[in-house]
Amino acid sequence: MTEHFETCYLIAYPDPASPLGKALRARGAWQATLKGAAIPADLGYLSGAPWTCGWGSTGPDIVEGIVWTQAHADSQLTIRLDEAADVVDRLVKVVLTPAQKAALVDFTYNEGEGHLASSTLLKLLNAGNYQSCADGLLEWDMAGGEKLPGLDARRHANRTLFLTGAWQP
């Protein structure tokens, strides 16, 4: 699921919801940027944080100009999915099916530990309300104050996997 929703880019790119990402999209330069085109000089003052590389990896080590190999991107995906699984294991206090855990690991990989830890959906889940937890996943479809179709599709897939044990790309 994570690889389906996280396209792999080997050249770091700005967050699409950042001021720089929004300006690039407004200019029609977003796709070129994803393919490694230089950021237009007149937009260089805008923040692109958090920068992303590989399969959606972010962090202090990922900045403008970083280039990864496919092998490094793949290894980072594995490492970061394992970290997300550890977070889910630590924060969730109820029994999960493998599919429920997979849905929450993908959510955590995408949103981060802090968002899961502070979320209403985690509180509902730990209270034993699995259905409300699954429904709560759908609320996480926005970035930078705007609803993104890709996040909406991902959250519906997370919910479907959580509730049914399967999903369709």
Image: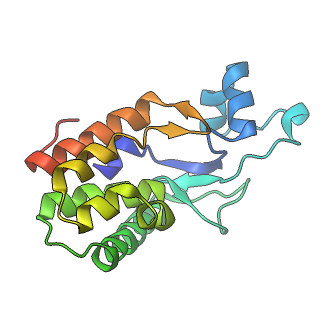
Q: How far from the left and from the top, in percent, is residue 136? A: 32, 46
Looking at the picture, the colour scheme in use is: rainbow
* Above or below, comparing residue 105 to residue 163 in the picture: below
* Residue shown at the point (25%, 68%) measured from the top left: 126
Q: How far from the left and from the top, in percent, is residue 92? A: 27, 72
Q: Quadrant of residue 89?
A: bottom left
Residue 32 in view: yes
Depth order, front residue of 101/77 = 101
* Residue shown at the point (60%, 37%) measured from the top left: 34
The answer to whether residue 126 is left or right of residue 109 is left
Q: How far from the left and from the top, in percent, is residue 23? A: 74, 29
The answer to whether residue 169 is left or right of residue 31 is left
Depth order, front residue of 161/2 = 161
Q: Quadrant of residue 76?
A: bottom left
For the image shown, how many numbered marks are present on the structure?
Answer: 0
Quadrant the C terminus occupies: top left
Depth order, front residue of 116/98 = 116
Q: Quadrant of residue 116?
A: bottom left
Residue 105 in view: no
* Residue shown at the point (13%, 48%) measured from the top left: 163
Depth order, front residue of 116/81 = 116
* Above or below, comparing residue 121 to residue 87 in the picture: above
